[in-house]
Image: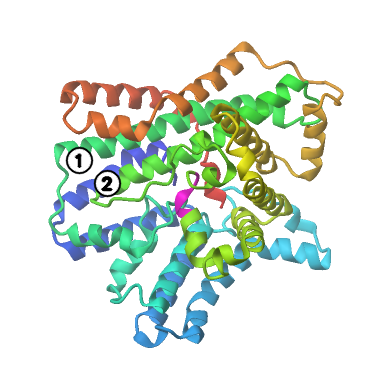
Amino acid sequence: MIFNQFEFLFVFLPLVLAAFRLLRGREIRVHLLVAASLVFYGLSGVEHAVVLAVGILWVYGVTRGDAIIGSKAWLLVAVLPPLGALTYYKYLGFIIRQFTGIDGALEDETFDMFANIVLPAGISFFTFQLVSFAVDRYRGDVAQVPPLHRFALYISFFPQLVAGPILRFHHVADGLDRLRNFRLTGDFSAKAIGYICFGLAVKVLIADTLSHYIAPLAADPGGLPVTAAVFVVLAYSFQIYFDFYGYSLIAIGLGALFGFTFPQNFNRPYSALNPREFWRGWHMTLSYWIRDYLYLPLGGNKAYVRNIVIIFAVAGLWHGAGWTFIVWGLFHAALVVFHHLTARWWNAAPRLLQLLFTFTLVSLGWVLFLFDFAEAKAFALSLLGGATVSQAEPSLEMWVAVLVAALICYGLRIEKIVETVTSGQAPAIMRTAGFALLFVATLLFLDRSETFIYFRF
């Protein structure tokens, strides 16, 4: 089940909200949300839910006692099984191909949330949350272990389960404490609905529209005129941004419906003036996770270049089991190191030039998410004008879609809009009408909507 399905919006979510409102006790509400989250996840494959539940039980069982505090042995006991599960489900095929040359059925790297139950959707996300909790217990940052059902909700809560944001326990602790008496007030519910409506809109109306235009061009990467290749670079850059940004907005809104405040996961990354700044605004909870649990333990700035290469290689591998993802990570490592070495000259350039240069480099990097190496090579020839053209030039309608995406990306601050119109600065009737119109416009195109890109990670 995914957020942009009629079944989620008009069956699952209303039923869970109704039951949540009727049940007032804090613990019973926790049990309800855990059960709802397991159903939400289990509908995409029973094996998914089993892997999730076993991971929760294992990490909780190992970390609930104080023996893990300061004990590397107990920390390894806690984290190796979930990391082993991640390796088995996500990376085993890749490892076997690299070291044995065995291929066959393992060559199929496509992901279908509903048909392919071998790879639990979003396993990288909830594995990182399990690991972060174990490390926080080891460090003593989580002094008191919550009851099992609260820990289970922290890991499995359906708004953030499949594609983040990647939460630490302190992100949900206050929400868990508020559950007993939490009631949706007018402004709070409006804010939650605003985030959900805007998130669905940018996903369905922008990201999926761009995907529709990209698909026939991406199917023939070696036969594109230069303008079509440029279109693919720009359109896919905005598609992946609005796809993931839309999910994050929906997740924040869904969390708010139940009294939880999730951390921001995006902060205008395409307005970044350099690669380092980009990573401070893109998938922020992943960036913070890598900083706190990998970069700083490795020594941080003491071995800057080495550690940057390591963490971005890990970030690439986290996204997918393939050399294209690893190379993508190393590409970003090279960008960050290059900026570090040339910061004196880079930062002296006009701000617009810095922005355009950063956006162009980041957008070119996304090509490795769209194509394998052979296709990327063919696409590079198209981009450089060396291809035998077999595809038409992009239409005016396609360029208008990219222009609209760019104007919304750079011209609107959706979080600020939602916060402003739900804080009493706009009449309630106008606010309600605006959200309703946006939601209805989105529903008109919901049947063509696609799975979120980051669901496969």
Residue 451 x/y as whole percent: 52, 40
**With 154 as the anchor, is 77 left or right in this view?**
right
Question: Which quadrant holds residue 225?
Answer: top right
Residue 355 x/y as whole percent: 56, 32
Q: Are the residues flagged by discs 1 and 2 in contact, CB closer than 8 Å?
A: yes
Which residue shows up at 51% across the image and 24% down it? 405
Using the rendered image of the protein, determine whether residue 123 is visible from the camera's viewpoint. no
In the picture shown, does residue 371 fall above or below 232? below
**With 321 as the anchor, is 388 left or right in this view?**
right
Q: Looking at the image, is mark 1 or mark 2 earlier in the sequence? A: 1
Where does the magenta region start and end? 282-286
Is the stretch drawn in magenta largely helix, strand or loop? helix
Q: Which residue is mark 1?
A: 188
Residue 234 x/y as whole percent: 62, 28
Q: Nearer the viewer, residue 276 or 392?
A: 276
Residue 327 x/y as whole percent: 71, 51
